[in-house]
Amino acid sequence: MYSRFFSVGLSLFIGLNAAVAELPKVGLKPVWKGLETTRPLWLETAPDGSGRLFCLEQGGAIIILPSDKHAVHPKREVFFDISERKPWRENEEGLLGMAFHPKFADNRKFYVYYSQQKPKRSVISEFTVAKAHPNRADMESERVLLEFPQPYWNHNGGVMVFGPDSKLYVASGDGGKANDPHDNAQNLTNLLGKIFRIDVDSRTGKLAYGIPADNPFAGRKDDARGEIWAYGLRNVWRMSFDRETGDLWAADVGQNKWEEVNLITKGGNYGWNIRESFHKFKEDGPAKGDWIDPVIEYAHHAGIEKECKFPGHGYGVSITGGYVYRGAAIPKLRGAYVYGDFTTGLIFAVRQKDGKATEHGTIHQQKGKVYQIASFGEDTAGELYLLPLVANPATERDPAGSILQLVAE
Ligand SMILES: [Ca+2]
């Protein structure tokens, strides 16, 4: 009885304070030292038992990381390369995402998300790996699934993940400029400012993919796109499924004040550009609506800290989403969602219950050289990595290496 009473009291205490928490500090350890990667944006493991880990580069290549992450100056093995198509013209364009088909072991299919020009657009394509050459994509095998316009060079989204349901979830970005000038994110008739969900294994009408019948707007006529799963998002920069619970976590980059982490639900409206995080954004926007608040937010600077729902949270300018940690190397971090800030390079973690933060904390503050956090990555064992932005390997590559593993401190 006593222990039960005690645990109720403890959870109340945590709930009221969203406590700065019992989360562990972590270290960063360079791995694949000296490997030449340029602007790595994503890590992906092949779901085929091979243990191969792939690293996507913004310029258009996907490389296979050597199986020995402690190898020094390992050979660069190129799996896929569309750099001649020049996807990376502007800062937020490029080869931005990739995902292996859940049945990759049988069908050898994978998907990429990249930028093209004239007109500016995002392209989602399927490629296949030739059976005889498992470490080399068949560059002739492209099947374009869909293309959609991107009016500006920024907020082009780009993360793609297969869900536990084997459907492909894609985050698009609101199309860019600032403040979502065309109100795309609240407009259900286009794919911008959305997370959408498609079935790569079927076809709906003349589309090169299927729209799952259980999508929230499936079957609507002209007033909503059936692909949409969630909306009201500005520029989700990295999302992931919790491999144990199936929760979909998405980090949404803010305008000038707030960065936020969201748990994505079917048909959910995450507020942008009427709301930003917990706060009103659009001056003449409606006062009430069915908006879903984030799990956690943080402020751009101390000047607005008194408005922040999570006092004591570190600052930042542009959020980079990560993963719920399910590895073994840092036991105290298990079950916490790890995220960071691109600009300040701080790494954070949060635990939640019913969509509300129960604990949060800064788990790493970089000292000396501060790496910008382009993305996080997760390997088969659930261990996490940080992909730092390195602009030009000829001049700016850090001799320590360009991928860092999160380790117990
Ligand atoms: Ca929001």
Image (spheres, rainbow, N blue to C red):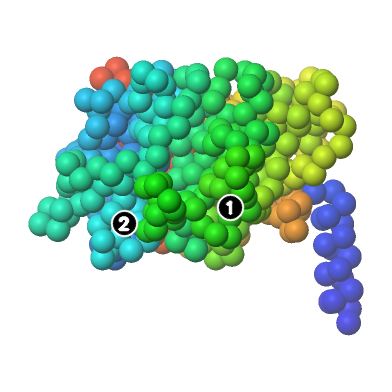
Residue 55 visible? The answer is: no
Disc ID at residue 273: none
Return the x and y of residue 275 as percentages of the image width and height.
76, 31
The mark lying in front, picked from 1 and 2, is: 1
Residue 58 as seen in the image, left or right of residue 325: left
Disc 2 within 8 angstroms of ligand 1 (CB): no
Q: In which quarter of the image is residue 189?
A: top right
In this image, 90 relative to 301: left or right?
Answer: left
| Residue 225 higher or lower than 14, as above or below | above
CA–CA distance in space, label 1 to label 2: 31 Å
Residue occupying the far left of the picture: 132
Mark 1 secondary-structure assignment: loop
- Residue nearest the observer in this picture, 45 or 279: 279
Residue at 52 percent across and 40 percent down: it is: 171
Can residue 4 be seen here? The reply is yes
* Residue at image point 55% right, 65% down: 244
Q: Position of residue 370 (x, y in %)?
A: 49, 26
Check disc 2 and report its element: helix, strand or loop: loop
Residue labelled with disc 1:
218
Q: Position of residue 153 (x, y in %)?
A: 47, 19
Spot occupied by residue 86 in the image (x, y as percentages of width and height): 28, 23
Q: What residue type is labelled 1?
A: Ala
Q: Residue furthest bottom?
A: 1
Q: Given the image, on which type of amino acid does mark 2 rest?
A: Ala
Q: Residues within 10 Å of mark 2 (few under 14, many from 20)?
A: many
Q: Residues within 10 Å of mark 1 (few under 14, many from 20)?
A: some
Residue beneath disc 2: 46
Is the CB of the residue bearing disc 1 within 8 angstroms of ligand 1? no
Note whether 20 is above or below 380 in the view shown: above
The residue sitting at 56% across, 48% down in the picture is 226
